[in-house]
Amino acid sequence: MRKILALTAERKSGGDLGFQSNKGAYCSRRERNAVISDVALTIFIIAIAAILSFIIVSLRRGNARLIHKLYFILAAGLMIWLAALIGIRLTDPNHMDMMFIWDSITYLGGPFGTAWMVLISLVFVKGLDHLPGRYLLFLIPPVIVNVLVWTNPFHHLIYQVFDIDSSKIVFGPLMFVSGAVSYCYLVSAVAIMIRFAVKSSSKLYIRQGFLFAIGALIPLVVNMMATFKIGSLGIEATPLAFTATITLHGFAIFYFHMLDIKPLAMQRVLDRLSDCYLVISDTGLVVNFNRQFQEVFGKKYGIQENTFLQDSVQVEDADTKSTFYNLTSSIETCREIMANISYEQSVFLRQDEELVKKYFMVEITPLLVEENKLGGFLAFFKDVTKVKESMQRLQDSQTKLMEQERLASLGQMVGGIAHNLKTPIMSVSGSMIAVENLVEECQRSLGDPEVTPEDYREIYQEIDEWVNKVREACSYMSEIITAVKGQAVNMSRSETEAFAVSDAMKRVALLLRHELVGSGCKLEIKNSISQDVILQGDINSMVQVVNNLVTNAVDAEKGMGGGVISILLEKTGEEFLIKVKDTGTGVPEDVKKKLFKQMITSKGAMGNGLGIYISNSVIKAKFNGRMWMEDNPEGGAIFGIAIPLQYVSFAEFQKRGDAE
């Protein structure tokens, strides 16, 4: 080892060291001990204990992200630096070899510390979870400085002359380069944080950014004073400055939860969202939210950053209690199952001095960090008010379309119904005339000795036969009137009750009898089930749907000169089926692709496409079923209605056979 060895006397940014070189004349222990005061020594020991405890506790808690790890490295570097200074304080100054080792160890703190601060600021504002390889280039200067320090006795590039007295220090040519790099690092770290803090609209981000910036600014100012020899600074000045830095950063972590949230760079983007979001830590602390959340929920419910959600809500009205309970209970459920939770929440907001009801779709997402540990929750509030209003308008429009289709269908049946009623009315009229004639004959024969009791019995029997015909005609008219009355009811006033499918099919046959006869078609109802089928729903809606399918089949058969239209009642393992089969012209390929998806017709100007589209909507909404179409192997088409068996029941009945 060369005669001139280094003892630490002064530090500047990133590695400004002063060494004592007395060219063989050693300073006394008293002089050396005076370099580091007892107060500074006490502070160093306390700082090391605090840093070590902080790192151990944080590592035990887990959930350490990249930015946490960088901060731990920075804190560990300062701890090594302070330990080396304590070593200098306690080492005999005559042991120059040991003094040189302690002095060189201190460089693991200063030069690397400024580099770690730049990396922390970049990782924080960019929200990085993995350190890009190019960022490691920031560590090259401190590595070079450390190599030069340990080899300084051979080249004197860092110090040419070093002494315990800072006025006698002569820096080497690379010391100024090293200092310039360290200053650039510190200035960059400060600038990055201030820039994003100023651009952020979040008070929490502003506090965090300025705390970090002030923490980095303290060692920058101290090192500049040391470099330009402003004031009288001892060897402990720079490490004490970095101790203040670590303290401020720790304050930001524990009080403002600086490292528990998303980076500042994303805040401006999030503030522009029309939807609301809320970030909550795993302990229930309100970490962050965007401007929209502040306007909608924050002001109304008193929710503030850096406060616990349970302590935030101040209003006690029913609406607030409901909203708050749904949010907190969903968060707890999300915590238990570790999966997304979604629900709809309505709130009343005051707009232009009026209370307006808003609807939000709320989704609670668990935020998982490394090793799938829970770090917090993200509550996203999607404003679906306009969507619900649009859906309501769509539902109203669909109801109007259904009503139009119902009236159109009813209008088409009016002519046939009138004809259907004409026949029984004429039958009743003829029967009454015959009865009147028989009554008159009976009255004229009173007192006639030639009229025997047997003749009267014959007259009474004829009257009874005509009365039975009147009764049958009235029953037939009653059935028609019941069917028409059901179809004349507004669709929006339909009632849900149990009904037999056989009754619905009977109504269909009655309502379409005239149309079937006029088109030369024959209707067959075939029930392959040995039981009567009972559905839960609106019989009038089912009648309208089947009416529409049969009417379409009649139109298809007209071009073929008429034919047989079959209504088939079947059951599979999972569904009850109603099939309407014809042997008509079939459905064009271009129409098949759009059936049930949009209003489309193959009837040209004679159709509007409402029937099938509305029928499909009715089956879905009122019977939890579905509709489909397939080609009839015998020619024509088969339209089907499928209803899950869970919505179907069966009852015993006496089989009636096929009905026309």
Image (cartoon, grey):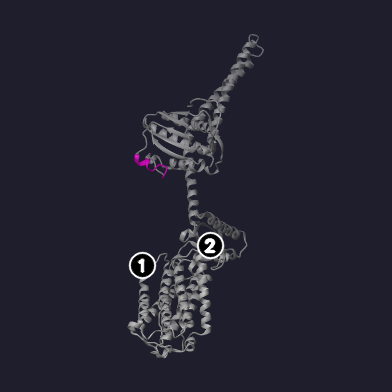
Drawn side of residue 365 relative to residue 595, left or right: right
Locate residue 563, reporting x and y percent: 40, 28
Does 91 lie within the magenta span? no
Q: Nearer the viewer, residue 107 or 91?
A: 91
Q: Which callout, 2 or 1, points to the residue nearer the camera?
A: 1
According to the picture, the residue beneath numbered tag 2 turns out to be 282
Locate residue 128, reporting x and y percent: 42, 66
Instruction: Give, as a single range, the part of the protein colored magenta.
Output: 589-598
Q: Is residue 460 above or below residue 183?
A: above
Quadrant of the image occupied by residue 182? bottom left
Locate residue 580, reporting x and y percent: 44, 33
According to the picture, the residue beneath numbered tag 1 turns out to be 133
Residue contact between numbered discs 2 and 1, judged by CB atoms under 8 Å:
no
Q: CA distance from mark 2 to mark 1?
A: 32 Å
Secondary structure mostly seen in magenta is: loop
Q: Nearer the viewer, residue 236 or 484?
A: 236
Could one spot residue 62 in this view of the protein?
Answer: yes
Crowding around mark 1 (Cα neighbors within 10 Å: few <14, some 14 to 19, many 20+) is few
Residue sitting at x 53%, y 24%: 427
- Name which residue type carries label 2: Asp
Residue extending farthest top: 450
- Name which residue type carries label 1: Gly
Q: Nearer the viewer, residue 557 or 365?
A: 365
Which callout, 2 or 1, points at the residue further toward the start of the chain?
1
Residue sitting at x 67%, y 12%: 447
Q: Secondary structure at mark 1?
A: helix
Which quadrant does the N terminus fall into?
Answer: bottom left
